[in-house]
Image (spheres, rainbow, N blue to C red):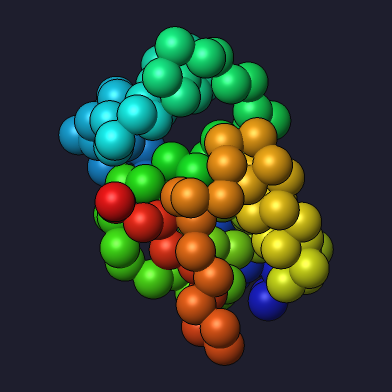
C-alpha cells in the first residue's frame, strides 16, 4: 500500500508540474546568464554552457525564484522522483558541478538550510 501511494503521489506531482510548466517562462535572463528551457542550454555572456539534465533542472529551479532559499527536501521533491534514492550528498555534488560550469557567483549555500540563486 505504501508503494502504491508513493507512485500515485509521484504521478499527481508530475501532472501538477506539467500543468505549471506550460505557464512557466521558457527563458530566464539574470545578469549575463541566460537559461533557455527549450534547448536545455545555458549561456553566460556569449559562451554556451552544456549541462547534464539534472544540473539544468537544478539551475532552472533555483533561478526561477531568485533569492529564495530552497531546502534539500524541496529540491529532492522537485527534481528527483520518489522512486529514486537520492541522498543530500547527491545534491551537494550536483551543486558543485553546477558551480564549476557556470561560476561560483550564482548559487549560494545557506548553511543548515539549503541553496539559493543570487540575483546580483
- Location of residue 55 by image quarter: top right
In the rendered view, tell whether residue 97 sits above or below residue 87.
above
In the rendered view, tell whether residue 69 sits above or below residue 113.
above
Where is residue 1? Give x, y as percent: 68, 75
User: In the depicted view, which residue is nearer to us: 31 or 66?
Assistant: 31
User: In the depicted view, which residue is nearer to us: 35 or 21?
Assistant: 35
Tell me: 21 left or right of 76: left
- Location of residue 103 by image quarter: top right
In the rendered view, tell whether residue 31 sits above or below residue 89.
above
Where is residue 22? Give x, y as percent: 26, 30
User: In the depicted view, which residue is nearer to us: 28 or 46?
Assistant: 46
Where is residue 38? Give x, y as percent: 41, 16
Residue occupying the point 71% across, 53% down: 96
Residue occupying the point 46% across, 24% down: 44
Residue ranking furthest to the left: 23
Whether residue 3 is visible here, answered yes or no, is: yes
In the rendered view, tell whether residue 75 sits above or below residue 112.
above
Residue occupying the point 29% across, 24% down: 26
Where is residue 39? Give x, y as percent: 47, 13
Whether residue 9 is visible here, answered yes or no, is: no
Residue ranking furthest to the bottom: 112
Amino acid at each position: 500500500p505504501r508503494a502504491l501511494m508513493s507512485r500515485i503521489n509521484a504521478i499527481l506531482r508530475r501532472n501538477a508540474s506539467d500543468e505549471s510548466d506550460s505557464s512557466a517562462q521558457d527563458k530566464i535572463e539574470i545578469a549575463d546568464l541566460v537559461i533557455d528551457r527549450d534547448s536545455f542550454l545555458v549561456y553566460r555572456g556569449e559562451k554556451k554552457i552544456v549541462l547534464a539534465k539534472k544540473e539544468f533542472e537544478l539551475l532552472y529551479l533555483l533561478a526561477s525564484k531568485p533569492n529564495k532559499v530552497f531546502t534539500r527536501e524541496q529540491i529532492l521533491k522537485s527534481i528527483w522522483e520518489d522512486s529514486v534514492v537520492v541522498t543530500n550528498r547527491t545534491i551537494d555534488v550536483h551543486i558543485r558541478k553546477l558551480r564549476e560550469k557556470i561560476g561560483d557567483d550564482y548559487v549560494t549555500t545557506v548553511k543548515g538550510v539549503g541553496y539559493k540563486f543570487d540575483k546580483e
